Amino acid sequence: MAEKNDKVHRQRPASRGRADKQRSFIIIGAIALAAVIFALVFFTVKSSRQARAAQAEMEQMQLDIAQQQLERDYQDLNDEFEQFENSRKFIMDDSVKRELNDKYEAARIQVEKLQQELANQKHKSAAEISKLRDEISTLRNLLKHYVAEIDRLNKENQALRSENKEIKERNDRLASQVSETRKANEELSERMTLAEKLNVSGLSLTPLNKKGKKEKKVTKAVQLCATFTIPQNNSTPVGEKTIYMRIVSPSGQLLGPGGTFPFEGGSVEYTAKKTVEYAGEEMQGVTIYYDVNTPLIAGDYTVELFADNFRLISSSFNLR
């Protein structure tokens, strides 16, 4: 029995030691586990913060890229709008175009304002970028409308130009017809006026001596006698007619002169004149005399007859 008890007593301290060891291991394990958990929690939190920071940085980068792309889109739209500057000037009188232009300018100012605000901000927001995107979308739609209006008005103007061209061509044809009619009327009037002219035929020039007979040598003549016939002309107004005669010597000197008469808005000197009563019937042997008052020479003499503001005839005669 005593041996058994001694054996029991020897066994109890050994089991207590093992239990203490086990508790130590458990405590150490718990501490290690806690340390691991703490480390895991620490690294998890740190990683989470880093991830959020990286995500935020990524989002800001994406927002920056989006802003830059929108700025390029705006610049492209602005360049396209500038291409229509001439067309805009061409249609500025159109009320629709003025209204559209005002809207476009207002939208463009709003876009530039948003761009400036974003440029001054260190951190962009998706809402602000979205607002800028909406404004640029509005600008793009306005530009499309603008281009469509320009195209519409250009087509209308093209139609008007075609119509104006047709009207101009019609007016040109009408003006040509009027000109031709006027010319025809003038020619008719001229023919009618010429038809009223007193006609002369059979004009001759004869030197005369003191006895009124024909003189062979013009240097001895005391008179020059022009003889002619006035044919019948029913178109010539009847009445008193004054016929003016001009005789130009071979040296180019006008013989006379006997005075002046009105002709084509001016005054013309004449050598001699004669007044006859014209009844519309033929008048033969009409004579006009020039009394020589200057020495005559042999050569070619030119005789011209005028009446009623017309040159009736002009003939040349060689006198020896």
Image (cartoon, helix red, strand yellow):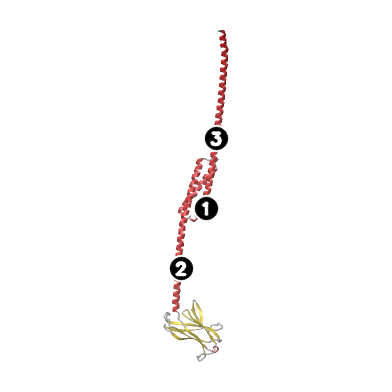
As helix, strand or loop, the secondary structure at mark 1 comes to helix
As helix, strand or loop, the secondary structure at mark 2 comes to helix
Q: Which residue is mark 1?
A: 83
Q: Which residue is mark 2?
A: 176
Q: Residue at x 56, y 30 (%)?
A: 43
In which image quadrant can residue 33 be found?
A: top right
Q: Nearer the viewer, mark 3 or mark 1?
A: 3
Q: Nearer the viewer, residue 165 or 106?
A: 165
Q: Nearer the viewer, residue 67 or 273?
A: 67
Circle nearer the N terminus (1, 2): 1
The three-letter code of the residue at mark 3 reads Ala
**Residue 24, horizontal then vertical, whole percent:** 57, 20
**Residue 264, horizontal then vertical, whole percent:** 49, 77
The three-letter code of the residue at mark 2 reads Ser
Circle nearer the N terminus (2, 3): 3
In which image quadrant can residue 184 be found?
A: bottom left
Circle nearer the N terminus (3, 1): 3
As helix, strand or loop, the secondary structure at mark 3 comes to helix
Do the numbered discs 2 and 3 sit on residues whose CB atoms are within 8 Å? Answer: no
**Residue 307, horizontal then vertical, whole percent:** 47, 81
Q: Residue at x 57, y 17 (%)?
A: 18
Q: Residue at x 53, y 45 (%)?
A: 69
Q: Residue at x 45, y 70 (%)?
A: 180
Q: Which residue is mark 3?
A: 51
